[in-house]
Amino acid sequence: MARVDSADMRSRRQVRWWQRRGSVRRLAGCFLAVSAATVFIRFAPEANHLIWIANGVLLAFLLLAPRRFWPGYLCVGFVAQAAGSILVNSHWEQNSIFNALNIAEVLISAFLMRLWSPGLPRFTDRAYLIRFVGFCVVAGPVIVGSIYGMIAAYWYPFPRTGLLQWAVADGLGAAVAAPACVAVFRMRFKSPAGLGKHWVYLLLLGVVSLVAFSQNTISVLFLVFPLLALVLLRLGLGSAAMATLFVAGIGSWFTLRGQGPFGFATSHSRLDPAIGLQIFIASAMFMLYTVSVVLESQHTTERRLQKIVARHSLVTENSRDIIILADFDGNRSYASAEAERMLGWDAEELAFHRSLDLLHPEDRPKAAAKVQELSAGCEGASLECRVRKRSGEYIWVEANLRVVRDPKSGKPCGLLNIVRDISERKRAEQSREFHLSLLAAIHEVSLDGILVVNEKGNVVSYNNRFSDVWKISAPEIPASLLEMDIELSDELLLSQVLGRTKYPEEFLKRVQELYADPEALDHSQVELVDGRTLERYSSGLHRDSGKHLGRVWFFRDITERKRAEQQLQDAFHTVEALAVTDALTGLANRRQFDQCLSNEWRRSLRDRGPLSMLLLDVDLFKSYNDAYGHVQGDCCLKQIADAAMQVVARPGDTVARIGGEEFAVILPNTDNDGAIQLAEEICEAVRRRYLPHSANPDGVVTISAGCATILPSLGRHSVTLIELADMALYQAKRSGRNRVCNGISACCKDDESLSDGIQNDAIFRIA
């Protein structure tokens, strides 16, 4: 197994080496081909003036090779012709001159061809074929033949004949051998396509050629032409050129032996039969070239038509539009495959129905009118209509109609109809119309003033409410948002609005900020100089892709709402005040008293300051009510409240009515002495009112006061202060009324002994 693999690897390496040496293989092939052609002709020296194919073979190599390889091919060609000549005869001096002339002729022909036709050989192209005949068949052989004619003057008595012989033989050799070799080389030396099927034509050509050249009459000779044309049609120009070369070989064989129509024995001159054979072979090649050009032109036309047909099929069969050909009566001659996919009708069913038969009854009159216009001379028209599908459902389509004219007469002969399904577009248009109508309705009935500005600063639309809100004169408003454009700059509109604002600089600055930032939102209020207030909302407009389109503004007059809100706020404050105020005296009620005491307790705890409280009670108030009545009792309470408010003047102090005839005063950051002094002033203020009280021993209304001071600390509660003041008030009542009794906390009496273990919470004294 390993040996097999090793052998296979060696074989592959050898093949790769041979493939990498492509230039060497081509040079070797050139040497063998040129030397074989030289030997073939040199074996019959009399045939040199008939056809010289060695130059044609070398010319084929040069036409197929890049120009940088020409020196190698020319050297190989010279050596091959020299080797072939030496094998035949020993006149090496004369052969060297002929070989040099042959190489010069091939070089001139190839240079002229490559100069005018830089691409690969195309013998079926008319322009290339004309250049090949002019440069390779005529110019090159004539130029070098002239040089040969001057040389032949020394060896032959007729130099002009030498020129003619050289030019005709080399030109004919180039005409026959070069196209044949090019065709063979392009097939990479493989069998021509179809040779296995059409070998009988080559055999028949060989038999006819043998028969024709073995006869002394020309009648049978012309049977060769149709057989060569048949080979050209079946096997191509390369095989036909090789076959012509084969016929030329047969003809030369018989002619050199004095047989056949061009035999030497039947002619008075040895030159005339050779020229006749050359003319015959040249005529055959001309016939092949002519037919090949016509065939190539036909094949080119066929390929172009095939491309057109393939492109047409590709377009029509894969188009999403229906392509229809019909006459003016609606009879269809062609419908693309999309008709069945879109409508469900196959080609036979569409051919059975006329064009107007499948349209919606409401659309038939306008379709018939369009067809009438086209038949009268109009070149094209478009139509949107509804077409019935095979299922009975109607779909919207867009039909683009074009007149088809007869190519010969130029008269209109039918219509080309390209039909496109626009059902989705129609639905989108209907939806768009609905949304535009809805938007227009909202635009006009909205309570907000709406202004829409595009990205260029031009007004797109605004409603009547906008001008009403700002009380400005505005141009005529369009009925629809899309029917017309408003030729109005936002700067002009802004100048009218700006003068109506209370703070124009702030208003303008904010507007400029919003225009500078497309993503910014704004929800604010604008105060006007006429006392009104507008609520403003603004937002940027963007596409789904994020592109900025402009900005929309909404303005609403909220003056009444602001007024209602203010009234509601005032009512709320009134209710809130009633909730914390005593209705009779206007002082703080018990609820406000508790809240104030809690707040001041926390503040004193935080600031470590004293907190004092006074509890006031009207002496013998029940007797007062019994003697003077409750109405007079209420007036008495108001007088006492007024007297207390006159004495308590600090903003932080609180006077409250906490019971029927009981009052309290909260004195934050007030020591005990200050609180006692304030209590005595209140009692004195009440006495100076001289309110008569017959049941009171003093004859006037008096009050008793309990005073307490405490330093709040953790673990204590504000109720402690109330209890101390209440105990002091009780002590004042027991001590004869109309006096101030002080109950001071032990921690306030001696600040340095906050936890000295005194069991009594308060020490009472009469002030």
Image (tube, rainbow, N blue to C red):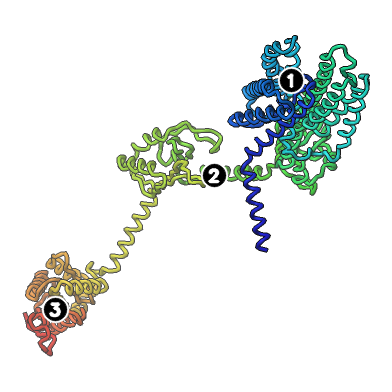
Q: CA distance from mark 3 to mark 1?
A: 142 Å
Q: Residues within 10 Å of mark 2 (few under 14, many from 20)?
A: few
Disc with the residue nearer the chain's start (2 vs 3): 2
Residue 411 visible in image = no
Q: Nearer the viewer, mark 2 or mark 3?
A: 2
* Camera sees residue 725: yes
Q: Which dot marks residue 710?
A: 3
Instruction: Decide which of tag 1 and tag 2 comes sooner along the chain.
Output: 1
Q: Which residue is mark 2?
A: 439
Q: Which mark is residue 254?
A: none
Q: Which mark is residue 171?
A: 1
Q: From the top left corner, tell me how far across and down residue 303 is, in percent.
A: 75, 33
**Amino acid carrying mark 2 in the image:** Leu
Callout 1 amino acid? Gly
Q: Nearer the viewer, residue 212 or 99?
A: 99
Mark 1 nearby-residue class (10 Å; few <14, some 14–19, many ≥20): many
